[in-house]
Amino acid sequence: MINLLLDVDTGIDDALALFYLADAQKQGLLKILGSTTVGGNVEVAQTTLNTLKVWEMLELEIPVASGAESPLQAPLNAAPFVHGDDGLGNTFLTPPKRLPVDESAADMILRLSHEYSGELTLLTTAPLTNIAVALLRDPDLADRIRKLVIMGGAVFTGNVTAVAEANIANDPEAARIVFRSGMEMTLVGLDVTHEVYWEEADLEPLININNERSAFLLQIIRFISGAYESLSGWRRCVLHDPLAAGVCLFPDLVKTEKRYVDVELNGELTRGMTVVDRRGRTPLGEDNMQVALEVDAERFKKQLMQSLLVWVQEG
Ligand code: BDR
Ligand code: CA
């Protein structure tokens, strides 16, 4: 059984990851112990509301601890043009009934790492600020985490810049602290997430069920597909965060290489770039994480759609 703590900036694809994980929990594949939020796609106040709201839609009472408002050193570079002003495709849902818990994100991370020492899996689908704050307070945290799965970075590409991915670019200093922490890590970056996307034709199973739940999912998926089309020319919903969630459960969805990875902090053109040393002989440092390079996209897309359909059909 996987004991999971999520760190999210909910966000359309974060929300889809929550739906996927909720279904996995129903199947007894994992237990979601808590969720922490951070500023990223939108401000942290909104990512917190969105996380609470998605758990409410799923009828789950998973605690939500609010975290960092802004990155360690630089201002937050949010992306409402990708995720909507409300972070959920301008669906402007009614506010959630529950409140965040009276514990900060870093406190929740540290507490659960003690309660589940050696057995806690962390999944981050957001800038790494909260994990870095927790590590700065207690570097031994790294030894108590079973595994950290990170949606972030890339070997060969970028999205917010030519070489940097949004979650890492939003807080490169935090990413460096995490990458150098000694934690057991898997990096699920753009090299694999860009292979896993839905286009309009993939949405047919949702379109065929005409109810409020399918309408909500179609609205957020189509919103982000439209944003992606204006940025890249392809009308697609890229399944970044859901794939990282999938890798927590089924590591064999991706093929990885263990490599030394660090983050560029200063480059005029390269700040936030993940530098992955793939040289055999003289790496910059000791291999510190598994880096995903290939993915079974069809297998994962089916899994994700199936989990959404379970929720939609119950509605
Ligand atoms: C990542 O950035 C955010 O926009 C998404 O939610 C995802 O976590 C992709 O680069
Ligand atoms: Ca995210």
Image (cartoon, grey):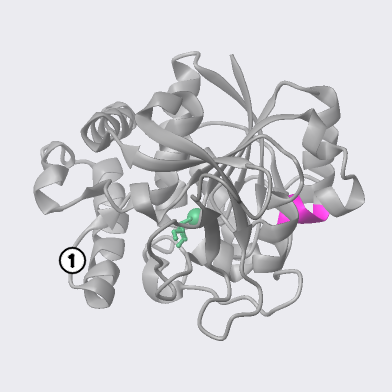
* Residue at left offset 73%, top offset 62%: 68
Which quarter of the rendered picture does the N terminus lie within?
Answer: top right
Asked where in the image residue 76 lies, by quadrant, the reply is bottom right
Counting from the top left corner in percent of width and height, residue 180 is at 74, 51
Camera-side residue of 68 and 26: 68
197 to the left or right of 91: left
Residue drawn 65% across the image and 79% down it: 266
Residue toward you, 127 or 226: 127
Q: Tell whether 191 sits left or right of 168.
A: left
Most distant residue in the bottom direction: 268
Q: Which residue carries the number 1 mark?
A: 234
Q: Residue at x 76, y 22 (%)?
A: 118
Start and end of the magenta stretch? 129-133
Instruction: Name the amino acid, label 1.
Output: Trp
Magenta-drawn stretch, dominant element (helix, strand or loop): helix
- Callout 1: SS: loop
Mark 1 lies within 8 Å of ligand 1 (Cβ measured): no
Which of the 4 quarters of the picture holds residue 267? Answer: bottom right
Q: Count all numbered tags in the image, as a single digit.
A: 1
Asked if the stretch drawn in magenta spans residue 130, the answer is: yes
- Reply yes or no: does residue 245 show up in magenta: no
Image coordinates of residue 86 in percent, x first then y, are 47, 67
315 to 42, vertically: above or below: above
Residue 5 image offset from top left, x and y in percent: 65, 35
Q: Is residue 66 visible?
A: no
